[in-house]
Amino acid sequence: MSAIENSKLAIIGAGAVGTSLAYASLIRQSAREVVLYDINEPKVEAEVLDLAHGTQFTGASCVSGGADLDMISDANMVVITAGARQHPGQSRLEMSGVNVGILRELMPKLIKRAPDAVYMIVTNPCDILTYAALHFSGLPSSRVFGSGTVLDSSRLRWLLAHRVGVAIANVHATIVGEHGDSEFPLWSQARVGPISLDQWVADDISPVTNGREKFSEAEFAAITEDVKTAAYRVIAGKGATNYAIGLSGARIVEAVLRDEGAVLPISSVLTDYRGVSNVALSVPTVVNAEGVSRVIEVPFSESEQALFQHSADTLRATLDTLGLK
Amino acid sequence: MSAIENSKLAIIGAGAVGTSLAYASLIRQSAREVVLYDINEPKVEAEVLDLAHGTQFTGASCVSGGADLDMISDANMVVITAGARQHPGQSRLEMSGVNVGILRELMPKLIKRAPDAVYMIVTNPCDILTYAALHFSGLPSSRVFGSGTVLDSSRLRWLLAHRVGVAIANVHATIVGEHGDSEFPLWSQARVGPISLDQWVADDISPVTNGREKFSEAEFAAITEDVKTAAYRVIAGKGATNYAIGLSGARIVEAVLRDEGAVLPISSVLTDYRGVSNVALSVPTVVNAEGVSRVIEVPFSESEQALFQHSADTLRATLDTLGLK
Amino acid sequence: MSAIENSKLAIIGAGAVGTSLAYASLIRQSAREVVLYDINEPKVEAEVLDLAHGTQFTGASCVSGGADLDMISDANMVVITAGARQHPGQSRLEMSGVNVGILRELMPKLIKRAPDAVYMIVTNPCDILTYAALHFSGLPSSRVFGSGTVLDSSRLRWLLAHRVGVAIANVHATIVGEHGDSEFPLWSQARVGPISLDQWVADDISPVTNGREKFSEAEFAAITEDVKTAAYRVIAGKGATNYAIGLSGARIVEAVLRDEGAVLPISSVLTDYRGVSNVALSVPTVVNAEGVSRVIEVPFSESEQALFQHSADTLRATLDTLGLK
Amino acid sequence: MSAIENSKLAIIGAGAVGTSLAYASLIRQSAREVVLYDINEPKVEAEVLDLAHGTQFTGASCVSGGADLDMISDANMVVITAGARQHPGQSRLEMSGVNVGILRELMPKLIKRAPDAVYMIVTNPCDILTYAALHFSGLPSSRVFGSGTVLDSSRLRWLLAHRVGVAIANVHATIVGEHGDSEFPLWSQARVGPISLDQWVADDISPVTNGREKFSEAEFAAITEDVKTAAYRVIAGKGATNYAIGLSGARIVEAVLRDEGAVLPISSVLTDYRGVSNVALSVPTVVNAEGVSRVIEVPFSESEQALFQHSADTLRATLDTLGLK
Ligand SMILES: NC(=O)c1ccc[n+]([C@@H]2O[C@H](COP(=O)([O-])OP(=O)(O)OC[C@H]3O[C@@H](n4cnc5c(N)ncnc54)[C@H](O)[C@@H]3O)[C@@H](O)[C@H]2O)c1
Ligand SMILES: NC(=O)c1ccc[n+]([C@@H]2O[C@H](COP(=O)([O-])OP(=O)(O)OC[C@H]3O[C@@H](n4cnc5c(N)ncnc54)[C@H](O)[C@@H]3O)[C@@H](O)[C@H]2O)c1
Ligand SMILES: NC(=O)c1ccc[n+]([C@@H]2O[C@H](COP(=O)([O-])OP(=O)(O)OC[C@H]3O[C@@H](n4cnc5c(N)ncnc54)[C@H](O)[C@@H]3O)[C@@H](O)[C@H]2O)c1
Ligand SMILES: NC(=O)c1ccc[n+]([C@@H]2O[C@H](COP(=O)([O-])OP(=O)(O)OC[C@H]3O[C@@H](n4cnc5c(N)ncnc54)[C@H](O)[C@@H]3O)[C@@H](O)[C@H]2O)c1
């Protein structure tokens, strides 16, 4: 063994998201080597320097990068954050055209240099772009996916953990569908520790919940709304979202580079999943060194099935508009 | 602030279990300071030295200890592993008498020195001894619990993770009841990622499971048996079990010292839980800096309710025999 | 124990530096609880949300905050990043006036709410502000210090590690003096693993250095210059520096909250250190739960002594100008 | 990428040392996959089970193993702990014959199955066995080394850290030579943070050291003696040493599998190092994915040179006796 083999993470785009994802990956040691690429040379060089200056505190993980694409050669995983960010008020789907164009040019160049990598799309609209990237790459569909609703699910879990008063690690709840306005929580499968969310506090007076009853429909609706509008509120207050997506992305990177078989709601092009095909959106997926190892067929309630179909239709319509058949 | 406050973990008993738990706690930095106590002075001093010699590699965590009980003063958590270990062929309940006697003498001395600590019993039979320790301590019941079936549940999850081919972190399954022969898995609540265990592979052909069907009743029964006999097999092969309980114990310690609110199947004295009172056994429990923050009322199937009652009856009978009303 | 005690880190200022420091602290679990405060309410609320949305991936660490200063009550450590950032071309000392004014108002309010905390100043010019903060606080000098040259030393180590081809953890080199233009590396004490830096490659042909000789004076001078101008270059390229200071700050936080006794070049008000008194600048310092536990009297070469005195004089002059006697 | 490549650690020998090393490696996630092998089938199977039962708490790291050597195939690193342990009173060199015999048989079988691995010898006498293993393997000398005095140096640092009152991470001191009675600390290069150990407390009154003076010759001698006899004392008290060597070994594994370039005092066959050739003993060494990347030529004082030569002569004599030219 003259060198280690599963070490190299390339991040395309050194904006707020790409650098936060690099930072989180370095601190968590998600990869041994992080390479950052951007077309904006002064920017990417400054970001690499700033990240590198902290590597005394990141164990064996190190960072390099610049505006020369050859630096990503032989990456084991490539994460794409390049593109326009979401402006205040702008819907995720509205950003599509420009970013599809960037991918059309970028993917062949990336695949030439990192032909064996697993590719993850973070740039928005990430479901549309995942479809586009797969299309432009010619890779097997397991090797191209989007970060999807991992972030949205983390937002949901944080809200629920506060509401029920247990550790966030013990709140199991998932957002599926589009990473965008048509997404929805799979309430039928949500759990707190060993019990179903809708049974929580059913027969128990906890000091935390002060005798409150079960979750009401209104609360479920309010929480759903809160998650769906979270990005808009963060963008309104600080102009972008970056920290939470940085951590979510780093976590998915680990699932791949450590060959974990972790279950995460990432976005991949589906084939006959609950009747949906030829569109990328998020469902619980087993993620390992191959990328998408398996999508899990979750039981949907009737209304969930309708919401899922609606989300797929929305995305398919956009793909059609963009000429992505 | 002249010193940190949630730092001190005292471990009573420097045998195979106590030292493994200390080792895991140091490596994971579960506590800032680990103190090991045992009546066997040469043994405990050698163990402390051996552990201390590795602390170059354990961050800020450090270890000390010996045969002087005053070293545990002001511990924030006390873990009791002292006592006779389980001999090959011996049932867990058969060890009771001797170990109850040890606790009767030990608890008052511990509480005098660490009056505000949370107490965890690991020594077997840990449910019986948890009851006894609470009894001898006069503490509120939230502050005395047993490591219970956290270990058994970890064994179950490991078996299931291999069987289904996903990361162990995404297998949610719990053993409840006695830490011993009458324990049982809560199959009705077991999940793989977002779906119920009995739906796994229902409508999906995974490469991992090669077209196999859903779990059969026979498989569930075989896995249950495997978990229940695991300790016996380990003891037959190596004379003790220590590594897995060391990690399980360190994990519970973290839930307390980091005030996590983690959901873990620890053993505490129950009051009208599914009809069971005045006996300690394991159910899913929210664990934080107070110890037992709340027991979670899990829905039981009819057969689970019967098994649970049987487990409680078994333990109550032993307690009666031992004169612990 | 009804709650954990060494858990609470308050960060004042939710700009690029404060939020990066919060992010790094959450990911590294440097504190159990991070509270972010800023006068800019929409901004700080958005930053807290974005950070909180990632806490599914940060273990037990959690974050809250806003524009209400009462949220920092009883913090164990307070890190101050509030203030104007360094503009391109601006020297660190030029920012002084405004930021001294902010501290004059802020310190009494902070101390009222967190009277037992250890205070760290990150805002620039950090040596001047450390002096000012101590002055305005009335606290013992051990409890108020600046992040100093921990960041600059990390930059130096990164450069050296690349040059010599060993892990950054084995490069021991320190920048002392002002966090600013008059700072300098203590070359006389710099080491690679067990040997003095100026002996590296003395009698050895390494593949990494390809037969190159010892470090030359010119190389030492170039590296010094590189470190001293690093911040300017990063600011020119990206408008601020935040990631490396975020990690450096989180590392210092750990030294305090874990009561480590770590040796770090932080900035504190010195009393007769190598002839220097009544000015704050960085020298190797033992940092623990009390803050500054001890400054270490490092042997200086003659030229190092002159540089150190010059650095102190520069800072003293600024303090005088600002009326801080 | 269909699988990760730097993941597999094989440990030969499932005794106290091999299992502790496996446990530490799992907890620290030093390797993705740990395989344990031993000729004692019931023992190794029980140890693997016990370790596996804890893997719910070890992230992505997993363990398997048994008495079938084929399980180690394609390991990236092989650590050898098989053999007779040191009995109370027995010198490390007295164990040689038997263990050389085991290696003679084992090495070819291992290399057939893991031809590209880096090999580390932990079994004692580890310097003798490192020489023998290299001899029997036909591998380049960079790919076979002994754990050497990493453990002994950790013992030294722990003693010094307590004596000076700073974090162990800031105490830089190294034991070199034989892992055994002729070893010695390189006092001339020992440091506390940025200063030489013999200057510590020179001009400073610390609360920790209560006005004590510099280290005296007598103290240096006592500490040296303490380190050299530590193993004997641990073995007298508990029958073996395992925890500290487990952590030391895991740390070295990381240096290799993460391609760190870490400086560690491992034992390798030297060629004209300070006049010593054709014998394996420990000196500060840069360790990366190739194994021994470079030995560092440390300046020795005159007495250190004499001690080093003596240590080499002692080992050479044993090698001669054993017929290992
Ligand atoms: N999927 C999610 O959950 C999620 C969350 C947050 C943000 N995002 C998306 O991530 C993207 C990036 O956001 P940001 O805040 O980092 O934006 P940003 O504007 O800060 O950074 C984008 C970077 O991409 C670079 N870039 C543009 N074209 C490029 C090309 N052809 N090659 C290389 N680099 C190129 C730009 O120079 C810029 O540095 C946006 O599309 C945003 O909507 C997604
Ligand atoms: N709850 C679980 O899941 C679990 C798992 C494994 C083992 N165990 C139990 O843990 C206990 C310890 O097992 P072990 O393998 O470490 O046994 P061991 O024999 O190796 O160690 C027990 C130690 O307790 C010490 N001791 C005895 N009386 C003492 C006293 N009054 N004060 C202090 N120390 C005292 C002994 O000197 C000995 O060192 C056993 O009861 C075993 O059955 C529990
Ligand atoms: N010491 C170092 O090594 C180091 C390194 C980098 C940056 N810095 C310094 O850190 C400081 C912050 O830099 P930044 O990039 O985060 O700047 P920034 O402008 O992004 O953020 C500063 C924040 O402080 C807030 N603020 C201003 N007055 C306040 C008050 N009275 N109370 C609370 N909050 C207040 C502002 O609203 C703003 O959000 C600057 O002084 C910069 O020079 C120091
Ligand atoms: N280098 C160090 O710093 C250091 C420190 C501690 C111990 N050690 C040494 O480590 C070795 C192991 O110590 P231990 O306490 O684990 O001993 P142990 O007796 O507990 O275990 C040794 C194991 O090796 C197995 N074994 C014997 N021959 C084998 C073969 N041919 N193939 C596979 N397995 C075989 C045995 O079955 C046994 O399980 C001893 O030589 C000891 O001196 C070295």
Image (spheres, coloured by chain):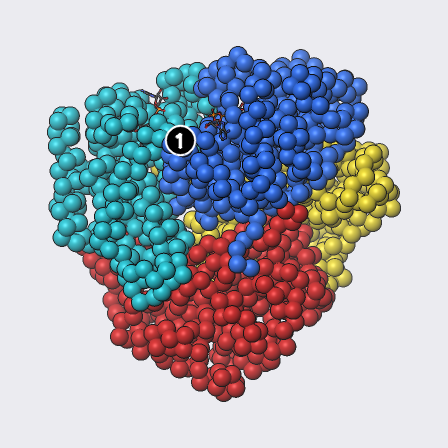
Chain colours: A yellow, B blue, C red, D cyan
Mark 1: which amino acid? Lys
- What residue lies at 49% left-to-right and 84% top-to-bottom? C325
* Residue B245 seen: no
User: Observer-nearest residue: B147 or C19?
Assistant: B147
**To which residue does mark 1 refer?**
B43
Give the image location of residue B30, x and y in percent. 53, 42
Residue B258 in the image: above or below residue A47:
above
SS label for mark 1: helix
Residue drawn at (87%, 46%) of the image? A218
Across and down, in percent, residue D173 comes to: 30, 50
Query: Is residue B99 visible in this depiction of the protein?
Result: yes
The quadrant where residue A217 appears: top right
Q: Position of residue D292 (x, y in %)?
A: 28, 42
Q: Quadrant of residue C47?
A: bottom right
Q: Nearer the viewer, residue D277 or A140?
A: D277
Q: Quadrant of the C terminus of chain D?
A: top left
Picture coordinates of residue C10, whole percent (x, y): 61, 61
